[in-house]
């Protein structure tokens, strides 16, 4: 079974530039999550989708971050404009359940390491 | 405010010994607690889930305890091996959301 795919793996940009990350979840997984992991910290949930609807985006800085999951499969996360403090690893995860419950096992991708200069 | 605290110091142990990691939390009422393993450059991998009404859970050489009175979970790796070297994250399930601690890095010396 193929895992969660993410691209790019690494990205370096200047502050105030835009950047987009892509995630392809495990086939058949209804729920998709984006996390931000700053160096030395645990992952922090940014947004959770169930199929193509948003379940939770309470911790997404909506003035600069946006995410979409068209057709309930792939997802993109965008930052515009980027700030220095956005430097982090952005992790995508998916889970099988349609209930949106966090008790469903989440499978994580390798992440995209973003450096903002 | 809500906090999840794991051993702040990295753990260095000899192969064959037991590693014990601590996860303490405040201002959460988790129904479940999970433990993940994260290797450098990779995403976390799920290891174990324990429910609030379970005291202990085992999986091969791993054992987790959950004490809702102490607001603490302990994670044990018995008969540790160099391949167990990684960062271990605890995560609380509360309000249908997963919240992670910062993790404890374990290094097992051969």
Image: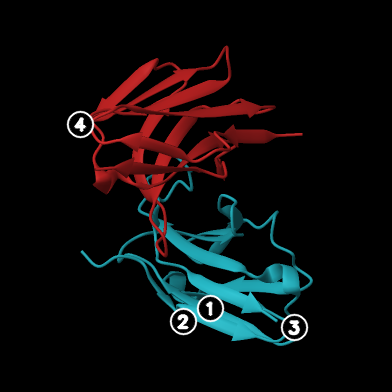
Q: Residues within 10 Å of mark 4 (few under 14, many from 20)?
A: few
Distance of mark 3 from mark 2, alpha carbons? 18 Å
Quarter of the view holding residue B6? top right
Q: Is residue B60 visible?
A: yes
| Circle 2/circle 1 CB separation < 8 Å | yes
Provide the residue designation for mark 2. A8
Q: Residues within 10 Å of mark 2 (few under 14, many from 20)?
A: some
Distance of mark 3 from mark 4, alpha carbons? 47 Å
Q: Are marks 2 and 1 on the same chain?
A: yes
Distance of mark 2 from mark 4, alpha carbons? 35 Å
> Does dot 2 land on a helix, a strand or a loop?
loop
Tell me which chain the residue with mark 1 is part of: A
Disc number at residue B60?
4
Question: Which quadrant, please, contains the N terminus of chain A?
Answer: bottom left
Question: On screen, A98 above or below B29?
Answer: below
The residue that appears at 40% across and 62% down in the rendered structure is B42
Tell me which chain the residue with mark 4 is part of: B
> Does dot 4 land on a helix, a strand or a loop?
loop
Provide the residue designation for mark 1. A21
Chain colored cyan: A
Spot occupied by residue B58 in the image (x, y as percentages of width and height): 27, 25
Tell me which chain the residue with mark 3 is part of: A
Provide the residue designation for mark 3. A15
> Does dot 3 land on a helix, a strand or a loop?
loop
The residue closer to the viewer here, B6 or B17, is: B17
Spot occupied by residue A33 in the image (x, y as percentages of width and height): 51, 59
Chain colored red: B
Distance of mark 2 from mark 1, alpha carbons? 7 Å
Spot occupied by residue B52 in the image (x, y as percentages of width and height): 47, 20
Q: Is residue A77 visible?
A: no
Quarter of the view holding residue B78? top left
Tell me which chain the residue with mark 2 is part of: A
């Amino acid at each position: 079974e193929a895992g969660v795919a993410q691209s790019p793996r690494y990205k370096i940009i200047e502050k105030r530039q835009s950047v987009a990350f892509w995630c392809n979840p495990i086939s058949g997984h209804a729920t998709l999550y984006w996390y931000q992991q700053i160096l030395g910290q645990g992952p922090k949930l940014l947004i959770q989708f169930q199929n193509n609807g948003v379940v939770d985006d309470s911790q997404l800085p909506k003035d600069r971050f946006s995410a979409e999951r068209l057709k309930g499969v792939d997802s993109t996360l965008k930052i515009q404009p980027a700030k220095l403090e956005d430097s982090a690893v952005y992790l995508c995860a998916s889970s099988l359940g349609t209930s949106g419950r966090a008790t469903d096992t989440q499978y994580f991708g390798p992440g995209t390491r973003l450096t903002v200069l | 405010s809500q906090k999840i605290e794991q051993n702040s110091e990295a753990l260095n142990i000899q192969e064959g010994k037991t590693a014990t990691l601590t996860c303490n939390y405040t201002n959460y009422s988790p129904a479940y607690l999970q433990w993940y393993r994260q290797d450098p450059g990779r995403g976390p991998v799920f290891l174990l889930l324990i429910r609030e009404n379970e005291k202990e859970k085992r999986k091969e050489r791993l054992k987790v305890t959950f004490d809702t009175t102490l607001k603490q979970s302990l994670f044990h790796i018995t008969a540790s091996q160099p391949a167990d070297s990684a960062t271990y994250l605890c995560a609380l399930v509360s309000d249908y959301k997963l919240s992670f601690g910062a993790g404890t890095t374990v290094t097992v010396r051969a």
